[in-house]
Image (tube, rainbow, N blue to C red):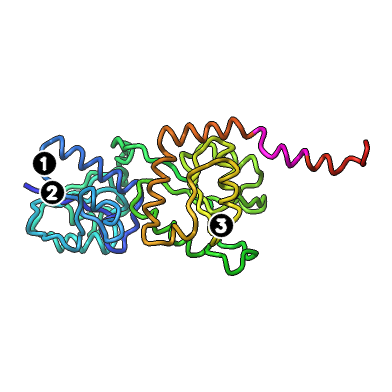
Amino acid sequence: MRVLLVGWSSVLHGEATAGDVLATEAVAERLTAEGVAHDLAWSPAMHRAHGPRGGLLLDDVDPAAYSHLVWVCGPLAGEPVRELHARFAHAHRSAVGVSVLDPADPAVTGFHVVVPRDAPGTAPRRDLAARPASPAVPVAGVYLTRGQGEYGARRRHDEVADAIGAWFDGRELARLPLDTRLDPRDWRLPATAEQVLAVVARLDLVVTTRLHGLVLALRSGVPALAVDPVAGGGKVGDQARAWGWPAVVGAEELLAADGALALDEHAAWCLSGAGRAAAARCRDEAGAAGGEQLDALVAALRPTGS
């Protein structure tokens, strides 16, 4: 007996959701506990994330190697489901944790056993995605800019942003694209500075090419991995020096062959106890930030001799 677990995260044009994957992992955990041999099959896109942790490409699977097929989660409808009935015609086919819209649909009737989470005439059951324990993943807020034309030929903003995006691929970081721009007319953007700070304070890490992405992270006691997108250095690198903050990468360093390694090393430090402690010290010092600038302004505003 060998079971192949499939779902919408397995088929080429399926829409994979976090719920689909967690429900599949819940089934895999139970089969492991029961001593049932099984494999997980993924679509090409999902295999990039889950293949290294165990899993096969569905297109590469030999159906003859499996006595059972189990479809997990999602609506039980559509051509991809019906195609699997034909491809695994020899196997015992089950579906679990699914939504049944039409009990007469061939996508449904092709299964020997259907254990739905919701179906006409049945009481709904709690979804399997709530079940499996999952490791905590650090949350990285990402503040990038592709603008700043004032730097002219020294701009490396687009290349740097692309390199950071490529670096995230395969890293166990929950990425949250954010913006420091305020616009109360657009619900997708923060309306006030306090809203920005409220989000930053809940992050584990900030990855930023923006000066204020760095400053607001340190003000909040959140480690920042800063990348200066200006060739030769610009305001991001200057601000990192002003704070004595070591986790900064220059554009040339990032775009070199080993640029990803530099990001890895700084990210690891930021997420370490030492990085968190350094960020906490910056938070404690934030109240005095810019004091000399304010003193100079006040002095300039006072009449001479007053």
The image shows residue 200 at horizontal and vertical percentages of 54, 41
The residue that disc 2 covers is 3
Q: Residues within 10 Å of mark 1 (few under 14, many from 20)?
A: few
305 vs 145, nearest the viewer: 305
- In the image, what residue occupies the spot 20% across and 42% down? 28
- The reply to whether the magenta stretch includes residue 161 is no
- Hey, what amino acid is under mark 1? Val
**Distance from the alpha carbon under mark 3 to that under mark 1:** 57 Å
- Hey, what amino acid is under mark 3? Gly
- Hey, what amino acid is under mark 2? Val
- In the image, what residue occupies the spot 64% across and 39% down? 194
* N-terminal-most mark, 1 or 2: 2
- In the image, what residue occupies the spot 57% across and 36% down? 220
**Distance from the alpha carbon under mark 1 to that under mark 2:** 8 Å
User: In this rendering, does residue 188 appear at all?
Assistant: no
The image shows residue 277 at horizontal and vertical percentages of 48, 31
Q: Is residue 122 left or right of 66 when viewed as pictured?
A: right
User: In this rendering, does residue 129 appear at all?
Assistant: yes
199 vs 133, nearest the viewer: 199
The image shows residue 253 at horizontal and vertical percentages of 44, 57
The residue that disc 1 covers is 36
Span shown in magenta: 287-295
The image shows residue 133 at horizontal and vertical percentages of 30, 35
**Distance from the alpha carbon under mark 2 to that under mark 3:** 56 Å
Check whether the beta carbons of the residues at disc 1 and disc 2 lie within 8 A of each other: yes
- In the image, what residue occupies the spot 55% across and 62% down? 146
Q: Is residue 14 left or right of 306 when viewed as pictured?
A: left
Question: Which image quarter: residue 105?
Answer: bottom left
